[in-house]
Image (cartoon, rainbow, N blue to C red):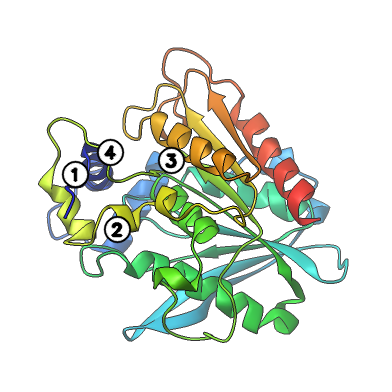
């Protein structure tokens, strides 16, 4: 088995460090407490003043989309205010080192109101977390979420042929896998197997793409997430084929946790296969688009609009 690279361990360590950065919780801190502290650390959404509130429709929270190993997996559904027929769907997958986080948090959650205001049905999902549920539990869950949406398309008034996904960091890794894998990868398990888990558009924010890349001084803590799972088989770049959907990648040039080279590797593979793909390099941005060396460019507001525009071009 190939040893997982340095940034995997760092992602896990960061998620644990975040949980200790506010109010210094003890080792016995519960997941809900850790998630709350992660929310304090990162902005959840863009200011509501950025949007026409009349275009922000209703919210249904904590809907069970699938049950895996006895765990009821929850999602939130954000409806646009205007009923324009069968809605195109955008699904958010949160980050957190595959071991923490929540569907209402993380850098990518800032796009939720922007997409809702633009007329998309927005879905945000939770998934099982390591170390209790090591990989591939996470990708199995988000694939089940896509299948569940198709199975309940009539209930949510959504178009099952127009589903896009986005996520950041570990969430970026998972949405990239959604974009590059089909049932032959072995990640489709559980309910609604008569439906496809393929998606039609992917926005990958600073996500790991090639877990076989070696960095000096790798951390064994990566085993908390991946255990003995083969690094290549957990890597989105492994599965790239010509029939993959369009990709938009955004990555901070100064990302010290997941190097921008990870997105460059995936970009080269996608373009080499003839898949429409673009990488936007965010200047002065560290991980999660945190400023590092000056104001980030494009700005956070501009990034949200880039995501909206991409999904409008690919799903509408």
4 or 3: tag closer to the N-terminus? 3
Query: What is the CA distance from the residue labelled 4 to the residue labelled 3?
Result: 28 Å
Are there few (<14), some (14-19), or many (20+) residues within 10 Å of tag 4? some
Residue nearest the viewer, comparing 5 with 52: 5
1 or 3: tag closer to the N-terminus? 1
Q: Which type of secondary structure does the marked residue at label 1 adopt?
A: loop
Query: What is the CA distance from the residue labelled 4 to the residue labelled 1?
Result: 34 Å
Q: Which residue is mark 4?
A: 213
Residue lying at 43% horizontally and 76% vertically, measured from the top left = 73
Q: Which residue is mark 1?
A: 24
Counting from the top left corner in percent of width and height, residue 152 is at 66, 83
Q: Quadrant of the C terminus?
A: bottom right
Q: How many marks?
A: 4
Are there few (<14), some (14-19), or many (20+) residues within 10 Å of tag 3? some
The image shows residue 197, relative to residue 115, as above or below, that is below
Disc 2 or disc 4, which is closer to the eye?
4
3 or 2: tag closer to the N-terminus? 2
Residue 33's disc is 2
Proximity of marks 1 and 3: CB atoms separated by less than 8 Å: no
Q: Which type of secondary structure does the marked residue at label 2 adopt?
A: helix
The image shows residue 119, relative to residue 49, as above or below, that is below
Are there few (<14), some (14-19), or many (20+) residues within 10 Å of tag 2? few
Q: Quadrant of the N terminus?
A: bottom left
Residue nearest the viewer, comparing 298 with 38: 298
2 or 1: tag closer to the N-terminus? 1
Q: Which residue is mark 3?
A: 42
């Amino acid at each position: 088995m190939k040893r997982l690279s340095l940034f995997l361990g760092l992602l896990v360590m960061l998620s644990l460090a975040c949980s200790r950065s506010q109010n210094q919780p003890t080792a016995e801190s519960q997941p809900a407490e850790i998630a709350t502290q992660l929310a304090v650390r990162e902005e959840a959404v863009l200011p509501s003043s950025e949007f026409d509130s009349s275009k922000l429709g209703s919210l249904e929270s904590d809907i069970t989309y699938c049950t895996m190993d006895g765990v009821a997996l929850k999602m939130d559904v954000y409806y646009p205010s205007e009923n324009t027929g069968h809605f195109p769907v955008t699904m958010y997958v949160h980050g957190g080192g595959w071991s923490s986080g929540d569907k209402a948090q993380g850098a990518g959650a800032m796009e939720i109101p922007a997409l809702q205001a633009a007329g998309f049905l927005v879905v945000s999902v939770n998934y099982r977390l390591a170390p209790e549920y090591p990989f591939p539990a996470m990708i199995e869950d988000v694939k089940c979420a896509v299948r569940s949406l198709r199975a309940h398309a009539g209930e949510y008034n959504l178009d099952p042929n127009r589903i896009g996904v986005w996520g950041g960091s570990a969430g970026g890794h998972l949405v990239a896998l959604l974009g590059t894998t089909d049932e032959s990868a072995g990640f489709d398990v559980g309910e609604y197997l008569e439906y496809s888990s393929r998606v039609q558009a992917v926005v990958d924010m600073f996500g790991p793409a090639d877990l076989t890349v070696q960095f000096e001084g790798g951390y064994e803590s990566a085993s908390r997430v991946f255990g003995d799972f083969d690094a290549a088989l957990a890597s989105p770049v492994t599965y790239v084929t010509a029939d993959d959907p369009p990709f938009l990648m955004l990555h901070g040039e100064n990302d010290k946790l997941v190097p921008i080279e990870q997105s460059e590797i995936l970009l080269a593979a996608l373009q080499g296969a003839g898949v429409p793909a673009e990488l936007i390099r965010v200047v002065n941005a560290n991980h999660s688009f945190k400023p590092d060396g000056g104001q980030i460019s494009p700005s956070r507001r501009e990034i949200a609009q880039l995501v909206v525009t991409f999904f409008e071009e690919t799903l509408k």
